[in-house]
Image (tube, rainbow, N blue to C red):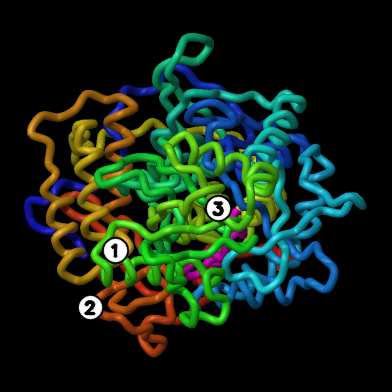
Amino acid sequence: MTGSPGAPALPCSLLAPPPSWAIDADVVVVGSGVAGLTVALNCAADGQRTVMVTKAQLDDGSTRWAQGGIAAALGDGDTPGQHSADTLVAGAGLCDEEAVRTLVTEGPAAVRRLIASGARFDTSATGEIELTREGGHHRRRIAHAGGDATGAEISRALVEAVQAAGIETIENALALDLLKDAEGRTAGVTLHVMGEGQHDGVGAVHAPAVVLATGGIGQIFSATTNPAVSTGDGVALALRAGAEVSDLEFVQFHPTVLYLGAGAEGQQPLISEAVRGEGAHLVDADGVRFMTGQHELGELAPRDIVAKGIMRRMREQNTAHMYLDGRHFGAAMWEHRFPTILEACRSHGIDPVTEPVPVSPAAHYASGGIRTDLHGRTTVPGLYACGEAACTGVHGANRLASNSLLEGLVFAERIARAARRDGAPSRAARPVPVPPPALPPPPLPAPEARREIQRIMTRGAGVLRSGESLARAAGELEALTPAKPAEPGTDAWETANLHLVARVLVAAARHRTETRGCHWREDHPERDDAVWRRHLIVGLRPSGAGPALDIRTTDSTAFPPIHAVAPEET
């Protein structure tokens, strides 16, 4: 699939000034959520010279917005096997079973190490970690902090640990493009730093290992739970560098996001799955619990099923939202268990203690991303990916609630070990001079195109998709050729990243002609295991007119090997 004649060229690099400064490291970690912070801490503890690059401040990533908690088999009677079974069901037949086994078996110890590093989870009167349930879980296995402020507490603990370790951090920095050496291996990354200080403008960190932990892609849609920094920068950077991405068509739309009215755009307040886990009901305007009978877990079914149930009822009743009713909780429970959600609702004029909360689905979590092996390696030697930016195979076609923080912990620790084994500290990063490209980088889109990209994606590639809507979205995205090239800058670079990720996502969604997990095709409403129980892998391949999309399918639910694995890693 190469796009239409006259479509805007796909970039192999961003139009940017050459670096005016450079620093050296063994490992550079891009992103400061749970994944990036954990990688940096483990690499630094291993004696590797580590530099952290973060787009805003250290604690401004998606992690601090995580309300529900972190899932792990920590409770009496729970086992990694049961956690695995729930994960596989949620993933709708596309989880990599070895990746899931890794997650659930290494997860409990990773959480205990997180606690040892200073994270404080809510405990009972006897000092045991309090565990709750969320959608898709048959056991109470979700550890939480501050009631519904788990991400904020994890972020606090890890940020303090990074600062105590003295890890060099570059804030307000947007990563631009990967640097490579003469053999095509990773040699660092270019970035643009906004602000005054030692590092300013476009520069580079030279390192033989680069870890992309840049978070999600939610800002390609008009309404999302993702913060403003989630513009798909890591996925876009990896694609331009020649890495493969997978499963990008599987975007999880959280079923219960506070409805703020028609036309609301940007980050929307999340109403955590844990609210339903504690017994809140989904109802329509007449008070009818419409999820009853649709799944054995009812309102605690996996998120794709609940989101579809809400959308169906909205279409049946020609309304823009449903309701989440937790009035029976009483004020004390709302204030103790869900203080963040209570404050968010009241700030928008809704009091969940006395009235049902209007909710509708919004873009939440990318189940796909940069394709990796079980040690975070991508298809570009020396380039690693972790957290929501990565596709480890854990989530399949739909993420199980609260598995994301655990995935960040487990695979971040594995990346740190792999970087050492792969010889990052022993290899000097020597970027080769970049020759003039055969074709100049395409012009940057105007920053104001961002909203148009979001509207195109919401209309054509949102919760409900069809061949017609996706074809229209593809055409509209290709037509977004700037009349006047934008000047290089953060807004234009972010818009370029969103545009590239949107085009790849739409191409993959058009290719997968079935409904599975959080990919819902109205024109192909059934799951098709005979044809589609496999992954879509997308990359950019060279062509005469510049890079073009290359889409292939795997033969099974297991990803093809990235490259040779050392014997001790098998």
Give amino acid for label 2. Answer: Asp
Q: Which is more foreground, mark 1 or mark 2?
A: 2
Q: Which is more foreground, mark 2 or mark 3?
A: 3
Quarter of the image for residue 73 reads bottom right
Q: Which mark is residue 550?
A: 1
Q: Which is more foreground, mark 3 or mark 1?
A: 3
Identified at 58% across, 46% down, the residue is: 66
Precedes in sequence: disc 1 or disc 2: 2
**The residue stretch that appears in magenta:** 393-404
The residue beneath circle 2 is 523
Taking the view exactly as shown, the residue that stands out farthest to the right is 126
Q: Is residue 423 visible?
A: no
Give amino acid for label 3. Answer: Ser
Quarter of the image for residue 533 reads bottom left
Q: Is residue 264 visible?
A: yes
The residue beneath circle 3 is 272
> How far across and how far down the image is residue 233, in percent?
40, 41
Tags 1 and 2 in contact by the CB under 8 Å rule? no
Q: CA distance from mark 1 to mark 2?
A: 24 Å
> Tag 1's secondary structure?
strand
Per the picture, the main secondary structure of the magenta-coloured stretch is loop
> Tag 3's secondary structure?
loop
> How far across and how far down the image is residue 493, in percent?
31, 33
Precedes in sequence: disc 2 or disc 3: 3
Quarter of the image for the C terminus: give it: bottom right
